[in-house]
Image: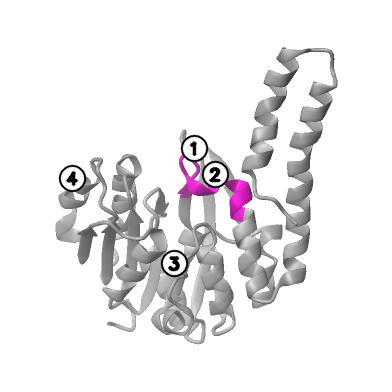
Amino acid sequence: MTSEHPRITIVTPSYNQGQFLERTIVSVLDQHYPNLEYIVMDGGSTDNSIEIIKRYSKYLAHWVSERDGGQPEAINRGFKLSSGEILGWLNSDDRLEPGGLEIVAEHARRFPQAGAFVGHGRLVDTAGRQTGRTRRSENLSFERFCNWLSGGDFMQPSCFFRRRAWELAGPLDESLYFAIDLDLWLRMARQVPFQPIDALLSTSLAHPAAKTVASRHLMTVEAALVVIKAGGVEFAKRPLEEMARSLARYEAMAQRILSLPLGHVGWRIARPLLRRREREPKIR
């Protein structure tokens, strides 16, 4: 490792994401960062992912394609293979912005006391249109992470951390599905300072198959449970109450439809609403 260019490890977990994977890989390699360690952990894909990985294999420090227990296990295994001083993971439908790793390295030099570094992130749709962007926050404390459900200040691909922070707070909880990053940030924020970076570091793609798009309510529940486990019960109450009110409208709407003189037509309209209510998590 050099003081000017500390080794940065990026781990990309992927499973059957061939339609997005190449763009992700290229966004990392096009950083042209001189001390990059790039690791791709594939979960045994059956699409064209392996073909894509092999195409870039000479630029990768490691790559694996075998069945695993899911995203957090793949990331944990990737970090076990790593030797970087600065770590981060990039999902296979996200990408780094040009020059992002140089900016992270610069802040690592300027702020040696910081254990993690957080830049801006943006969200785009499948047509490339920007649909959201995070704002800069100077307050990246444990309490701020507990209040995550009221509006997070950054996106996971724009967060990088020192190895010592990972050793103190990691690994990822492999029993989680949605809130693996929030759980790590809560543990890490108790151990090391987070340093904000006033620059765009990554872009995340919102598409129908993305788990955070497909299961918004389930994500809220798991994130709330993570916050409660960390001691933030009061922070979790309001988002859960808001979600409960949102879900209640399905039943109310269905009952109003059934009260109309529509016969079987009314039932056919109301039934999907009631089924959706049953599929959603029940908040008590």
Q: Earlier in the sequence, mark 1 or mark 2?
A: 1
Q: Which residue is mark 1?
A: 208
Looking at the rendered structure, which numbered label has been put on residue 51? 4
The answer to the question of whether label 1 and label 2 lie on touching residues, with beta carbons closer than 8 A, is yes
Identified by mark 2, the residue type is Val
Of label 1 and label 4, which has the lower sequence position? 4
Q: Earlier in the sequence, mark 2 or mark 3?
A: 3
Q: Nearer the viewer, residue 263 or 85?
A: 263
Which residue is rendered at x = 53% and y = 78% of the image?
188
Q: Which residues are magenta?
A: 204-219
Instruction: Report crowding for label 2: few under 14, some 14 to 19, many 20 or more residues within 10 A (C-alpha).
Output: few
Q: Where does residue 224 sit, x and y in percent of width and height? A: 66, 62
**Residue 148 in the image, given as x and y percentages of width and height:** 66, 63
The residue tagged with tag 3: helix, strand or loop? loop
Give neighbour class at mark 3: few <14, some 14-19, many 20+ (Cα, 10 Å).
some
| Farthest residue, direction front | 264
Q: Which tag is nearer the camera, tag 2 or tag 3?
A: 3
CB within 8 Å, label 4 to label 2: no
Residue 32 x %, y %: 28, 61
In front: 163, or 42? 42
Spatial CA span between label 4 and label 3: 28 Å
Task: Check disc 3 and report the residue beneath it.
Answer: 174
- The x, y position of residue 3, in whole percent, is 33, 84
Nearest-to-viewer mark from 4 and 3:
3
Q: As shown in the figure, which amino acid type bears the numbered disc 1?
A: Pro
Secondary structure under the numbered disc 1 in the rendered image: loop
**C-alpha gap between disc 4 and disc 2:** 27 Å
**Could you tell which of marks 4 and 3 lies nearer the N-terminus?**
4
